Image (cartoon, grey):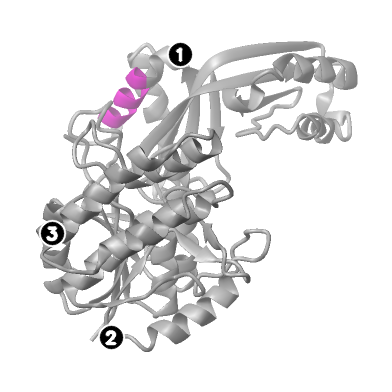
Amino acid sequence: MGTKVVKFGGSSVADAIQIQKVKEIVLSDPERRFVVVSAPGKRFPEDSKITDLLYLCKTHIDNNFTPEHVFQVICDRYRMMEMNLGVNIHIDEDLQEIRQHLKPGISADYIASRGEYLCGKLVAAVFGFDFVDPAGLIKFDARGRHMPEETQKALSEELAKHEHAVIPGFYGADPDGNIVTFTRGGSDVTGSLVAKAVGADMYENWTDVSGFLKADPRIVKDPIPIKNITYKELRELSYMGASVLHEDAVFPVREANIPINIRNTNEPDNPGTIISDTPHEHTGIITGIAGRKDFTVISIYKNMMNSEIGFVKRLLAILEQNEISFEHLPSGIDTVCVIISNKELEGKLQDVTEDIERKLQPDTMDIYQDMALIATVGMGMNRRLGISAKLFTALTNANVNIRMIDQGSSEMNIIVGVENDQFTDAIRAIYDAFVER
């Protein structure tokens, strides 16, 4: 029998009704032996996530306000879940222990982690599985940096003792036993670490969407699902904003050659999307389209730039000195463009341009703001003739002005820059050109 590690996001464990769905999913497949859970998410649009409420408690404490009213909302919600699930985990004892820590000096990581901790205990009781606290198993150093090798060893040794277990996501501990959390969405990382530790055959990540889609459904009506995607394609699309799971969750399972299956708790019969390094056939030429708005392009022209040794190095040094990271750096014989997120440039654009003028002495320098980047991604694109022509023709026919073109060295993506106000038109035009409805 194989082993599957299953992780359920906040929407999947938002209340007792959702947790019953989770129970049916897990118990329907005997290979689903290890379960990782997030803290309860929103039950309805106006609701609050438990993690947000816990952080709000911390904010109240830091500002010398009592957190009791906020914490009471958390207590009521967990008590209701315990009652509606028909289990008794003595949750009042855990809540009272947490309440005693709600005082100045409390760690934000500790209080935030209690959402997953309590949810894990509830889910373990409902399933009849062992509860395994990741504190002491998922290891961080004294500076809060994750220690993957030590984590792998500790998790493997502990989980080998359990036939079935529920593990809270999001947190571990440092050598002194202090709770340390991953960044938000870090339960995905916990699931990936557990999958690697137990040598899983599959890591199922259950959420409220049925995998990846070829385009953003807020822009393209009813986009086609992506059944299979490689890790490289996922990286390209996630970088441009089409992310369903935490980016750091990919690396542990990819190292162990474990595929990821993105599934929908509310549509358990939908096969979702499989992420792996296994070559696959796509529906159509491209895998997907994704993009982001709000970039600035600094375009520099200098005659004989190509013969001026170290020109680009000095340009990047200017960005480094201003603590700015860049997105792309397309260039020509006498030109180079640096594309930077507007967030990176906040309050720094004038300093950067003045440094460029003084240190590089360009013949001309143009600034294009409010730009958007769109990536068209597909592993097989480099084997198809006329892809670029087809893409540019589609944009031309949609009256979209292309301000920048950058094709990655892997030849699996083409990135175009357009103005923000033409972003949606451009994505729709590309989708219609490559995807049969």
Instruction: Name the residue type under label 2.
Output: Glu
Quarter that holds the C terminus? top left
What's the magenta region? 424-433
Tag 1, which secondary structure? loop
What label does residue 128 carry, if any? none
Instruction: Name the spot of residue 372 as percent of width and height, x first.
Output: 48, 22
Which residue is found at the position 33% from the left and 56% from the top?
38
Report the mark closest to the observer, 1 or 2.
2
Give me the C-alpha separation between circle 3 and circle 2: 27 Å
Left or right, 241 with respect to 139, comes to left
Instruction: Name the residue type under label 3.
Output: Met
Instruction: Name the spot of residue 74 as percent of width and height, x first.
Output: 30, 47
Q: Magenta stretch mostly in which secondary structure?
A: helix
Using a 10 Å C-alpha cutoff, classify the residue at mark 3 as few (fewer than 14 neighbours), some (14 to 19) or many (20 or more): few
What label does residue 401 carry, if any? 1
Quarter that holds the N terminus? bottom left
Which residue is found at the position 30% from the left and 33% from the top?
216
Instruction: Name the residue type under label 1.
Output: Asn
Tag 3, which secondary structure? helix
Residue to which mark 2 is pinned: 163
Residue to which mark 3 is pinned: 83
Q: Is residue 428 magenta?
A: yes
Which of the 4 image quadrants contains residue 21? bottom left
Which of the two labelled residues, at mark 3 and mark 2, occupies the earlier sequence position? 3
